[in-house]
Image: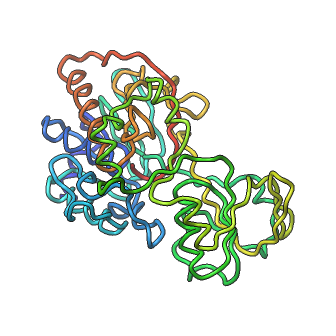
Amino acid sequence: MQEQMYQDTSPDRLLDAVVIGGGQAGLAIAWHLKRQGLRFVVLEAGSELGHTWRDRWDSLKLFTPAQYDGLPGMPFPAPADAYPTKDPVADYLQTYVTAFDLPVRLNARVTSLTRTDDRFEVRTADETIQARQVVVATGPFQVPFVPPAAQGLEPSVTQVHSASYRNPEALPGGPVLVVGGGNSGFQIAEELAATRQVDLSVGERAPMLPQRLAGRDLFWWLTRLGLLRVTVDSRLGRRASRREFIIGTNKRRLRKAGVRFRPRLVEGDGRTVRFADGSTLDVGVVVWATGYRSDYTWIHIPAAVEHGQVVHRRGVTKIAGLYFLGLSWQHTRGSALLGFVNQDAAYLADQIAAHHHAGAPAKAGVTRLEGRGAGSGS
């Protein structure tokens, strides 16, 4: 397959499409493009498929059960209501590519995307590929973000972003401060609390939802009630997209485990941090569960990205033939979730097919939404 990929992406061939990113979003759109019979390639920066999953912390579990974790054409291979861990997810992505013989090229980090006349040029360290259409599917986890307060802490303080956290044993002994009130922060704090004192700094109050209600998984209810179809353009969608929901745990549960809650961290000085209420804490280990930021500096196409934000409507940009997939709240809450990204992938595949066959750009208005994250592929 590698030899065929090389032939398909040789510089003297104009491809119908290039997909940038070989995570769940990139593979979902690839499935549709292959069914359409288009000549395309998926460029994945990593050395193996699913590496962004394998690189997460050891105990990570999806909060969507297996029946909601499949990509188009292949259910996730686990019993209903099982919650897959990270390695089976990575294995599933590898199996998916093999099963459908998708043209994925590894170790192909894109360094530049430009447009010339009626085509795009996609550059990697090894080659330049030309294509009529491009899908950017680099995902919501790109560049780990650490607040400026971290710079005030002295070198003797161990600092780890959640992107690099693996397990409690990998950290020095003693108390830990976890900073960040999202799902990652809550999960890591609860895991660490089993073996040491943990303080959790939370900046904003987030709604907390149980994993199961009345014997059913949360996503059964969200699907049945149509809440996963609520779009970002709706009043409810606009409100929901501005905050993260904590799923499967809550403050009461963490307090019972011994976690002490702190306000927003505002300053680091030596081995001491200060919180928004004026209180302080001496620290030796800090885990920054403070999320990610986008990095589109490699996209050199005017009007595609403005002030770090993708300008699009449901993934369709105002540049004919350029699309984005896998952004958080690209269209609905499920846009960046493994088992729900196919809805946006199918929509974009229709736009790509229309452009390919008619030679005309997809018609869409344009809104500006932030693609939160980084990584090789969503």
Q: Position of residue 376 (x, y in %)?
A: 43, 52
The N terminus lies in which quarter of the figure? bottom left
Q: How is the image coloured?
A: rainbow
Specify the quadrant of the image occupied by residue 118: top left
Q: Position of residue 252 (x, y in %)?
A: 58, 62
Q: Residue shown at 23%/40% (left/top)?
A: 40
Side of 117 where 170 appears, left or right:
right
| Vertical arrangement, residue 106 with respect to residue 370, above or below | below
Q: Residue shown at 47%/46% (left/top)?
A: 140
Q: Nearer the viewer, residue 350 or 259?
A: 259
Q: Position of residue 141 (x, y in %)?
A: 49, 51
Q: Residue shown at 45%/73% (left/top)?
A: 58
Specify the quadrant of the image occupied by residue 98: bottom left
Q: Nearer the viewer, residue 355 or 234?
A: 234
Q: Position of residue 336 (x, y in %)?
A: 39, 44
Side of 229 where 8 appears, left or right:
left
Side of 2 where 329 appears, left or right:
right
| Vertical arrangement, residue 221 with respect to residue 241, above or below | below
Q: Nearer the viewer, residue 349 or 126?
A: 349
In this view, the residue farthest toward the front is 214
Q: Nearer the viewer, residue 45 or 351?
A: 351
| Vertical arrangement, residue 137 with respect to residue 162, above or below | above
Q: Residue shown at 21%/24% (left/top)?
A: 356
| Vertical arrangement, residue 94 with respect to residue 133, above or below | below
